[in-house]
Amino acid sequence: MIHIVIVSILVILSTLGIYYGFLNNETLLPEAASAQAGPIDELFNIHWIIMAFFYSLIMVFILYSVVVFRKRKGDESDGAYFKGNTRLEIVWTIVPLGIVLFLALQGGKALAEVERRASDAFDVNVYASQWSWRFEYPATGAVSSELALPVNRQVLLKMSSSDVIHSFWVPEFRVKQDILPGGEAFVRYLRITPTEEGFYKILCAELCGTYHNEMRADVIVMSEENFETWLESQSGCDLGSAECGQRWASANGCQGCHSVDGTTRVGPTWLGLYNSEVPLEDGSTVFADEDYLFESITNPTAKIHEGFNPDAMPKTFSELLTEEQINDIIEFIKSLEK
Ligand code: CUA
């Protein structure tokens, strides 16, 4: 009897120690910044406690037995032999079954909570491609390479990919969704209600090729007024201008690989590119005029700049961009002439 009391106390102490010592959400998870994070963190908590308890139960039993029932000097007798215990077997079948059913119920509730739609939700179209993000606000036609969101309002992300499978993940929002290629029929949805203003990062969570690790984008959660101002600043520019071109370039993540200040990134810098002599992989050179720029955007492997990986450049811009937008981007590159 005394053994059961001691073991019980040790199991309780160990469970609490493990849980509060390192398994609780505060030490394990980043800040929670969305309404959807609540039910998910609660679910995590339940799992942590159950895990801490069973780990403690097993470890305390083993260690207690090893220490307390160890072989004494001069004692050559064997331990008592017994076989089978129906009552124990029933208990260890029913208890885990109950736990699994309980967790399934909690999981179902959390999923329903996370997917619940709000009546004031607004849409953002998300386009993922190797290796950048693009966000479209259909209400105003704004396009951006960063995801701006108003605080405390639900956004419905409608996500598609132009090439391979990617995955939208912001750790602080907790929710994650794979993004599939294949067009309309494969659009995937994700609901997020940001609850904290601030800056976050989208991380692509699906291995999607050479520059998967660089496939990130900023998320800015701002007040409703700032969001309206931001939306306005994103729409409207004089077509055919370098200013518009800069916007399309930014919205499509061009500057992730092409700097505008002369530094070399994954792709050649745009500073001084126009009207320059470009060395090609085959040893020849080409004069960077408008035709060359247009071809390099729409068909990037036609002429390969010496020293750069031709696979780094997405081959989808002829579909993603209109001819006017491409011409605007060329205007922008021209404005960076040295
Ligand atoms: Cu896209 Cu990894």
Image (spheres, rainbow, N blue to C red):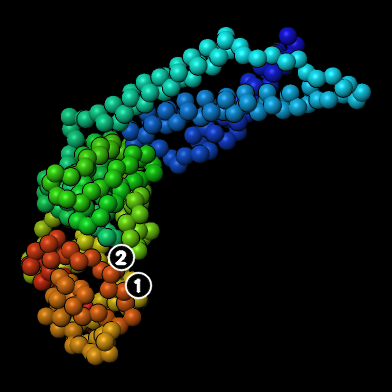
Amino acid type at circle 1 is Arg
Identify the residue shown where x is 16% and y is 68%.
245
Query: Residue shown at 52%/25% (left/top)?
Result: 50
- Marks 1 and 2 sit apart, C-alpha to C-alpha, by 8 Å
The C terminus: image quadrant: bottom left
Q: Position of residue 284 (x, y in %)?
A: 24, 90
- Residue 24 in percent (x, y) is at 52, 32
Can you give x and y, in whole percent of width and height, for residue 96 in the image?
A: 49, 20
User: Which residue corresponds to the image point at 35% horizontal and 49% vertical from the top-left?
Assistant: 205
Disc 1 or 2, which lies upstream in sequence? 2
Q: Which residue is mark 1?
A: 265
For mark 1, give the secondary structure: loop
Q: SS for tag 2?
A: helix
Q: Position of residue 118 (x, y in %)?
A: 21, 30
Answer left or right for 307 relative to 6. Answer: left
Q: Which residue is mark 2?
A: 256
Q: Is residue 303 above or below residue 61?
A: below
- Label 2: how many residues lie within 10 Å, few (<14), some (14-19) or many (20+)? some
* Image quadrant in which the N terminus is located: top right
Report the side of 49 relative to 311 (left or right): right
At x 22%, y 78%, the residue is 336
